[in-house]
Amino acid sequence: MLLSLLILALPGQSASERPHKPITLSSTGGFTIGGRTIPAPSNPNLTLSCDHGYMEYFLPLRPRKTSLVMWHSSSTQVWQNTWSGGPGFKDLFLQRDYPVYLWDGPHVGRANWPCSPTLNLPTSTDATNFLAWNFGPSYKEWWPDVRFPTHDAAAWHQATSARYIEYETKANVDLHARAAATAADSGSAGTNIVYLTNSAAGLRAQLAATLSATTNIKAIVAYESIGFVYPDSANVTAGVGGFGPYVVSGAQFRKLAAVPAVLFVWGDHRGEGFGSLAESRRVAGLINEVGGNARVVKLGEVGVRGATHVPFADLGNEDVAELLEGFLEGEGLDGYVDGEGEGE
Ligand SMILES: *[C@@H]1O[C@H](CO)[C@@H](O)[C@H](O)[C@H]1NC(C)=O
Ligand SMILES: *[C@@H]1O[C@H](CO)[C@@H](O)[C@H](O)[C@H]1NC(C)=O
C-alpha cells in the first residue's frame, strides 16, 4: 500500500499506470504457424519453409477461456508497454487472467522468413509514423491533450524506432489473413479467440474471418482499422493496394458477420469525415444487415480523450482496457476454464 502511494506520487506516472496485482503464469513460449515449404528451383530435395506467422504466448496460472491475440500492424511493442514504458495491454490482460498471444504475421517481426523477395527502401519514416499514429496534425505538433509524454524525447525515440517494416500490399494482406485463419482454425491459440487489432491489421483480421473454417474467432476488436471488407452486393470497387477495400462473396461476408461480436474503435482525433471511420460505420451496418453484431465506438464519446492511433499504448490506457474488459464481459467471453466464478 505504501509502495503504491509512493509510486502514485512520482511525477510523470499517472494513477492508471500504477502497478497492479502480480502476474502468475503457468507457461510462456512461442511457435510458428501456417506458411509453406517450397522446393529450391535447382534441387527439389532442398527446401525453404517460409511465409509462416509467429505466435508468442503467455498463459495465466488460472486462465480465462478466451485468448486475446494482439495483432499489430506497427510492432508487437505497442501491446507491451505504454509510450512511457508503463504496462501495456499484454500485462493489463494477463493481470485479468486472459491468455495473451502476440502475433507477428508473415514477413514481419519474428516471422521474417519470406518465400518471395522483399524490398524495403529506407525513407523519412519518423515523420510518417508521427502522422500515421495521429500524435498531432503535423510532424512534431502534438495534439494539446494527446496521451503521449510529449516532452520526453526518449519516449518519442522509443515509439518511432520500435516500429517494424510493414508490407502494405494486397499480396501481404492475403498472406497475413490466410496465416491468421490457419492459426485460428488450428486451435493452437485456443478455440475462443479474440483478434485485437490495430490499424491495417484490422483489415487482415476481417479477411481472416472470411477465410476461417471454424467458429474459433469469437470477436474482432479493431482499434483504428484502416481497410475494410465488403460483400460483392455492396457496389464497392475492390482496391488494388494494401488498404482495401476488399470485396468478397456474400457467403464469405456472412462468415465475417458470423463472428459473434465485431467492434471498431476510434480515437477522438478522428472526425466523421475520416474515410476509414466512415467505412467502419458502413461495414458495421452491412454486417448487422446479415444478422451480425458489429458496433462502432468513438472513445471521445465514452470518456477517453486525447487518444492516438494506438489507444491501448496511450498514457492512461487503463480506461481503454476497462472498456475492453466490459466488452468481453458483455459478450460472455470472460468465463474461466475451470468454470468457477470471478476469481478476483
Ligand atoms: C534428390 O534425392 C533423391 C533421393 O535421395 C536422389 O535420388 C536425387 O538424386 C536427389 N536429387 C538431387 C538433384 O540431388
Ligand atoms: C454503383 O456505384 C456506381 C459508382 O459509384 C454508381 O454509379 C452506381 O449508381 C451504383 N449502383 C447502385 C445500384 O447503387
Image (cartoon, helix red, strand yellow):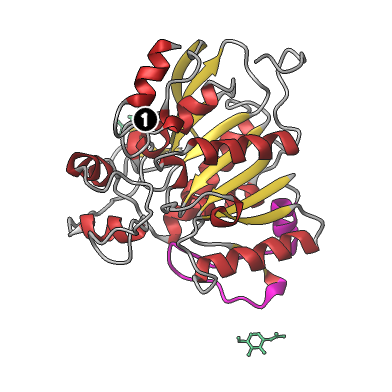
Of residues 122 and 160, which is closer to you in this image? 160
Q: Residue 305 location, x and y as percent?
A: 48, 52
Q: In which quarter of the view is residue 105 placed? A: top left
Closer-to-camera residue (78/102): 78
Name the residue carrying label 1: 86
> Which segment did they paint magenta?
233-257
The image quarter containing residue 242 is: bottom left
| Residue 103, horizontal then vertical, whole percent | 46, 35
State left or right for residue 279 relative to residue 170: right
In magenta stretch: residue 235: yes
Residue 269 lies in the magenta stretch: no
- Residue at position x 59%, y 24% in the image: 98
Residue 246 appears in the picture as rendered: no
Say which amino acid is labelled 1: Gly
Image vertical order of residue 335 relative to residue 82, above or below: above
Residue drawn where x is 70% and y is 59% of the image: 253
Q: Is residue 257 above or below residue 109?
A: below
